[in-house]
Image (cartoon, rainbow, N blue to C red):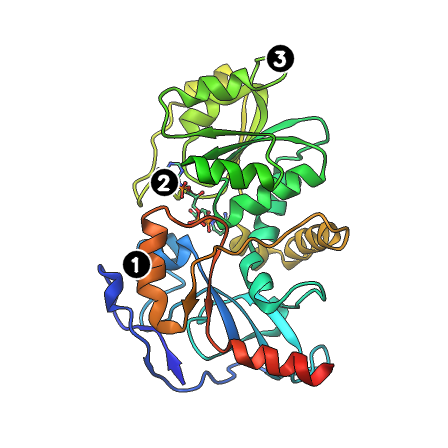
């Protein structure tokens, strides 16, 4: 099969070329074989390619097949949970390939209303955002939440989850087009991070001018988040998409002065330590999906085949993308399967 293998970390995305690689084989009795139809292009994948993610120190070292999220068709399953031909999606290393072999436990059936491309666009982002906003920050109806990194793959899920539980949403975005799209998605307000003192605008948009109840931070901007937060507000740290690998130093007295609660959320590690918590966030998120409250958001760029990865990463780096960029790998397989079902 063809795959994008990281033999050594790259500094130029043009070096990410598909090559022949052995079909992935089962290492555990719980492994499932899947033909990949789609793979997501995420911030994490860009970091993995360059060796800049915290996991590159321990869990993800060369050689490995790049790509962390996928949708596909089951080839063979170790149990009767899935049958060959079932449409599935999940998050697991090695998705920039024609086939992937992962633990069956991390794979879910594609909801009937979604295509594989749509399921791939949601990936684990819905569960991560649900865990952050609901399990950790305890966001409630009537509260106001500021979403940092609102136009990203995680952010578009956070906006919709917050709206589904009845919160008011202020989205931080990079340009007018993204502002329009985030409002279409349900954000009540959108503020540009390119304007000076945007934190003041956020506070002015809260009902009493005292600041937001919750900040969902996927970009790494805690000092700004604290400026936007009301007294006894909650911040959940989700990611660092704006930091280019350089972490922020936070003046701890700012946290004390607001009696703020600052909480990190690491979806993968949480699941490794206690799989029940992962099940809880998935079940909460999928309830919202079934209630019709969540739309997958696929970026309009046409990324056909593993060869388009450098172009897609270039678009991500240039801030062109909103929602999730999705790579189409064996898309025709899904179509064939659908036709066979009719
Ligand atoms: N905690 C967890 O378990 C977990 C799980 C998955 C991912 N993550 C992390 O979450 C973060 C977001 O992931 P993602 O997949 O949503 O990324 P993404 O799709 O690439 O989106 C990144 C977002 O950050 C914004 N952004 C980038 N540079 C910015 C800047 N200088 N100032 C303000 N905003 C900026 C982008 O807006 P513009 O395009 O407008 O700049 C976009 O909305 C990443 O750091 C990722 O590693 C965490």
Ranked by sequence position, the earlier of labels 1 and 2 is 1
Figure quadrant, ligand 1: top left
Instruction: Name the residue at 77% across, 51% down.
Output: 291
Judging by the rendered image, the residue that carries numbered circle 3 is 208
Q: In the image, residue 11 lies at what x, y percent? A: 22, 59
| Vertical arrangement, residue 141 with respect to residue 112, above or below | above
Q: Do the residues under discs 3 and 2 have CB atoms within 8 angstroms?
A: no
Ranked by sequence position, the earlier of labels 3 and 2 is 3
Asked whether mark 3 and ligand 1 are closer than 8 Å, the reply comes as no
> Is label 1 in a helix, a strand or a loop?
loop
Q: Which mark is in front, 1 or 2?
A: 2
Q: How dense is the environment of label 2, judged by Cα within 10 Å: few (below 14), some, or many (20 and up)?
A: some
| Vertical arrangement, residue 311 with respect to residue 242, above or below | below
Q: Nearer the viewer, residue 138 or 331?
A: 331
Q: Quadrant of the C terminus?
A: bottom right
Q: Do the residues under discs 1 and 2 have CB atoms within 8 angstroms?
A: no
Can residue 302 be seen at all in this image of the molecule? yes
Asked whether mark 2 and ligand 1 are closer than 8 Å, the reply comes as yes
Judging by the rendered image, the residue that carries numbered circle 1 is 51
> Is label 3 in a helix, a strand or a loop?
loop
Ranked by sequence position, the earlier of labels 1 and 3 is 1
Instruction: Name the residue at 60% across, 63% down.
Output: 119
| Vertical arrangement, residue 7 with respect to residue 114, above or below | below
Q: How dense is the environment of label 1, judged by Cα within 10 Å: few (below 14), some, or many (20 and up)?
A: many
Residue 195 tag number: none
Judging by the rendered image, the residue that carries numbered circle 2 is 242
Instruction: Name the residue at 52% across, 48% down.
Output: 154
Q: Quadrant of the N terminus?
A: bottom left
């Amino acid at each position: 099969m063809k795959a994008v293998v990281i033999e050594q970390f790259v500094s130029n995305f043009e070096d990410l070329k598909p090559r022949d690689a052995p079909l992935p084989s089962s290492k555990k009795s719980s492994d499932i074989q899947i033909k990949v139809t789609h793979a997501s292009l995420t911030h994490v994948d860009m970091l993995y390619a360059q060796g800049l993610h915290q996991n590159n120190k321990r869990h993800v070292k060369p050689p490995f097949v790049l790509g962390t999220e996928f949708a596909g068709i089951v080839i063979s399953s170790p149990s009767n949970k899935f049958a060959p031909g079932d449409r599935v999606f999940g998050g697991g290393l090695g998705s920039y390939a024609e086939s992937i072999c992962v633990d069956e436990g991390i794979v879910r059936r594609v909801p009937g209303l979604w295509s594989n491309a749509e399921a791939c666009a949601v990936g684990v982002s819905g569960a991560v955002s649900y865990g952050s906003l609901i399990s950790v920050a305890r966001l409630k109806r009537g509260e106001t939440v500021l979403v940092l990194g609102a136009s990203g793959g995680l952010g578009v899920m956070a906006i919709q989850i917050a709206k589904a539980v009845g919160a008011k949403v202020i989205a931080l975005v990079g340009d007018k087009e993204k502002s329009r799209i985030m409002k279409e998605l349900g954000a009540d307000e959108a503020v540009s991070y390119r304007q000076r003192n945007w934190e003041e605008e956020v506070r002015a948009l809260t009902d009493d001018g005292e600041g937001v109840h919750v900040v969902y931070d996927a970009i790494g901007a805690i000092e700004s988040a604290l400026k936007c937060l009301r007294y006894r507000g909650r911040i959940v740290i989700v990611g660092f998409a704006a930091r280019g690998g350089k972490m922020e130093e936070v003046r701890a007295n700012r946290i004390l002065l607001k009696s703020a609660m600052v909480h990190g959320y690491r979806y993968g590690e949480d699941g490794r330590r206690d799989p029940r918590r992962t099940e809880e966030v998935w079940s909460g998120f999928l309830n919202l999906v079934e209630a019709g409250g969540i739309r997958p958001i696929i970026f309009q760029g046409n990324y056909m085949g593993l060869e388009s990865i450098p172009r897609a990463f270039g678009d991500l780096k240039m801030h062109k993308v909103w929602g999730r960029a999705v790579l189409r790998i064996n898309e025709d397989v899904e179509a064939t399967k659908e036709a066979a079902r009719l």
